[in-house]
Amino acid sequence: MFFKDCLYFLRIKDWIYIIGLSLLGFVYGIKQFELFSLLILGIISSLYLAHGYTLNNCFDVLRLKKTPSISFRKGLVISYSLFVISCIIAFFYSKEILFLIVIGSIVGFLYVGPPFRLKRILAANFILNSLGFAILFMIGFLLNKTLATDMWLLAFYVFLAIIPAQIIHLISHRREERIWRCGQKFSLCCFNLSLIVFTIWSFVIVYWFEITYVLFLVTLIFSIIQFYTVKIGIKRKVDFKKIRLKLRIVNIIFGIGILCIFLFLS
């Protein structure tokens, strides 16, 4: 029972596909592929995400209601054990990655932990949530490369890519979390604006680095698909939670497309 509760507590099915963000950073500009480095990346990324999601579980679920085998205290021990293990691995591999993991943990605590719980403040919710995932991309980038301007620009690309998904998440959980209190019309305006900003930034990147414009075209198509997925869903009165699941699939396909582009550029 305890093992089963631990698996549920880790929320693996909620973040397993997000590991792809670190893989994007890893393959961008890669000169030599090393299986061992990829293995280390998989371990560190998994621990990073598991720590973040379990920390969120601790303060959003366990603090209010205990599970049969996992109390709030046990949950924190599990979460920070994952954090410590990732730090130990990073210490022997890359001090820069260790720094990012620590920053990511701080971001996660500021997001859900008292007395801060900045997730309740809308602007902070977007910034901290997107920053946590952008850090995951940077971890992958720095595993086989050094700090560079393109890392920051692409990390911001990931940062902006997360915002539309977070808007839909908040809308779909508005009754449970009560963070997003905007009307539907204004909500859609925010969602569409976030897609526009994201697409424009992709153009800035390809123009700045003079890399293939396929990145911009794929981003544009991705944004259009998201726009129509939400628009059609609302027109058919589909529940936002179902729309969110459809967008998750679209995001996964988009991530695979970007991965192919980055491999082509290598």
Image: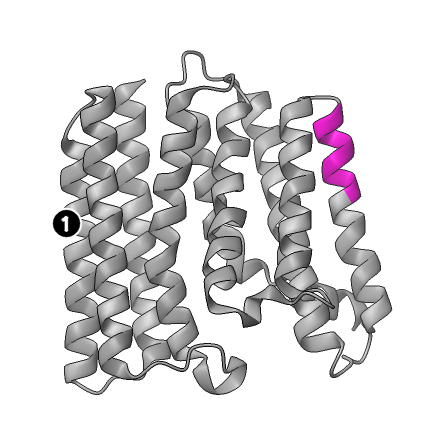
Indicate the quadrant where residue 28 lies: top left
The answer to whether 161 is drawn above or below residue 156 in the figure is below
For label 1, the crowd category at 10 Å Cα-Cα, with few meaning under 14, some 14 to 19 and many 20 or more, is: few
User: Considering the image in quadrants, where does the N terminus appear?
Assistant: bottom right
Q: Amino acid at mark 1?
A: Ile
The answer to whether 177 is drawn above or below residue 117 in the figure is below
Q: Position of residue 245 (x, y in %)?
A: 35, 69
101 relative position to 77: left or right: left
Q: Please provide the residue range marked out in magenta.
A: 84-91
Residue behind mark 1 = 221
- 15 drawn magenta: no
Q: Residue at x 37, y 67 (%)?
A: 167
Q: Residue at x 22, y 70 (%)?
A: 189
Closer to the camera in the image, 99 or 3: 99
52 relative position to 91: left or right: left
Q: Residue at x 25, y 31 (%)?
A: 205
Closer to the camera in the image, 97 or 194: 194
Q: Position of residue 156 (x, y in %)?
A: 39, 40
